[in-house]
């Protein structure tokens, strides 16, 4: 009996010794290095970099958490006791940020927390909207990594801008901006640059004495016309009133013809636009814009006022029609031959009386 007890004690001690040896073989999770690829950055990474984690006791990876709030997905097939790989995420909605932040790894052998620095990438400019800018008009800049912008300049001069998102900003172009100027966006990540080309912009008239056409007169069934009405948003403006007369069947105002507004190379109507500031006394007042060419052709575009406040109406020459705007699309319109712009009121389908107001007429070629 005593011998049996001795044998049992010996067996129990042997089992305890074996278990202790097994426990001695278990290695707690430990991380020696985090290496970003490409570039072999140590304990640093850019968003979307793959990071190779090296250490011991890393088998059975269960969870990776960045900055105590962002769970990182990983492929368990790329997990060994000495290494695994994951990709740095970046999601504004989840609170991603740049800078040094904790990252926690939970494995089958415990958890370990290290610090990693998320670096801000260099910003890029991919395109502008529109592709060809116009002095005095806003310009949207699309790109990447527009975070923590410190300055936006054009030709070395600071610009006001509105940040729409991390991939889009809107800048206000000065009226005296020069084509070929360099746009520069600076962030902590670096600098993005792009040469900005500007459209050809011709001021027809601002009714303050500036432009290629300054002496305006009216004709036809008008009640009154004043090319020097005071109190506009940018100075004087023109006012044309129609009170129902149909003696002539038409009306309008013009500063006459003359030399072509655009050069002979600016032919494409789809790249040519008229910008005109408009208002009226009543919703529904209908503008009639007429273009005459150096070779005696005429085209028209009609539109109704939908807002009594001053607004800028932009019209593509490709949208003009022949027969004073009531005919077929002006497919043969050569923008380089336009030498006169007339502004009037459509006498049909318009309120009586109608008083239209207009200012700052420009022709723009992109």
Image (cartoon, rainbow, N blue to C red):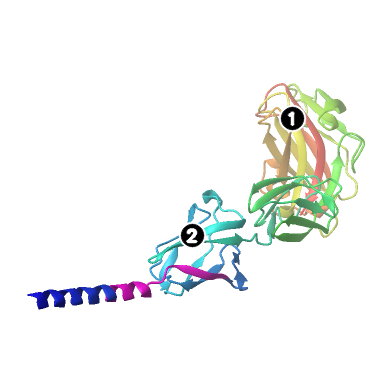
Instruction: Give the CA separation, mark 2 to mark 1.
Output: 62 Å
Element type at mark 2:
strand
Element type at mark 1:
strand
Lateral position of residue 56 relative to residue 350, left or right: left
- Report the quarter where the C terminus lies: bottom right
The residue under the point 32% across, 76% down is 21
Which quarter of the figure has residue 120?
bottom right
- Report the quarter where the N terminus lies: bottom left
Q: In the picture shown, does residue 18 fall above or below 346? A: below
Q: In the picture shown, does residue 86 fall above or below 214? A: below
User: Is 29 in the magenta?
Assistant: yes
Residue 31 spot, x, y in % from top left: 50, 69
Which of disc 1 and disc 2 is earlier in sequence?
2
The residue mark sitting in front, 2 or 1, is 2
Residue position for label 1:
279
Residue 230 visible somewhere in the drawing: yes
Q: Which residues are magenta?
A: 18-35
Residue position for label 2:
104
Residue 267 visible somewhere in the drawing: no
């Amino acid at each position: 009996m005593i011998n049996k007890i001795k044998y049992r004690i010996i067996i129990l001690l042997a089992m305890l010794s074996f278990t202790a040896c097994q426990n001695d073989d278990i290695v707690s999770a430990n991380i020696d290095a985090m290496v970003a690829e490409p570039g072999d950055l140590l304990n640093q990474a850019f968003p979307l970099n793959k990071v190779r984690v090296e250490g011991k006791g890393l088998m059975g990876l269960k969870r990776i958490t960045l900055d105590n709030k962002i769970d990182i997905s990983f492929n368990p097939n790329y997990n060994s006791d000495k290494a695994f790989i994951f990709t740095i995420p970046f999601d504004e909605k989840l609170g991603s940020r740049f800078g040094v932040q904790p990252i926690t790894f939970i494995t089958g052998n415990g958890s370990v927390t290290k610090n990693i620095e998320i670096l801000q990438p260099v910003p890029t400019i991919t395109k502008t909207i529109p592709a060809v800018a116009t002095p005095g008009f806003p310009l949207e800049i699309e790109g990447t990594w527009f975070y923590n912008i410190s300055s936006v300049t054009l030709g070395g001069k600071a610009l006001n801008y509105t940040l729409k998102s991390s991939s889009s900003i809107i800048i206000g172009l000065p009226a005296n901006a020069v084509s070929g100027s360099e746009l520069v966006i600076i962030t902590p990540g670096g600098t993005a640059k792009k040469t900005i080309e500007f459209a050809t912009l011709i001021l027809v008239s601002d009714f303050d004495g500036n432009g290629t056409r300054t002496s305006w007169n009216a004709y036809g069934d008008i009640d009154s016309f004043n090319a020097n009405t005071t109190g506009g948003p940018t100075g004087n403006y023109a006012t044309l009133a129609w009170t129902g007369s149909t003696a002539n069947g038409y009306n309008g105002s013009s500063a006459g013809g003359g030399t072509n507004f655009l050069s002979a190379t600016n032919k494409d109507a789809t790249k040519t636009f008229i910008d005109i500031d408009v208002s009226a006394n009543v919703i529904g007042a209908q503008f009639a814009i007429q273009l005459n060419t150096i070779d005696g052709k005429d085209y028209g575009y009609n539109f109704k006022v939908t807002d009594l406040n001053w607004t800028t109406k932009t019209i593509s020459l490709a949208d003009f029609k022949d027969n004073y705007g009531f005919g077929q699309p002006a497919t043969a319109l050569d923008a380089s031959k336009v030498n006169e712009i007339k502004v009037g009121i459509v006498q049909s389908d318009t309120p009586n009386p109608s008083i239209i107001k207009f200012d700052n007429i420009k022709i723009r070629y992109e």
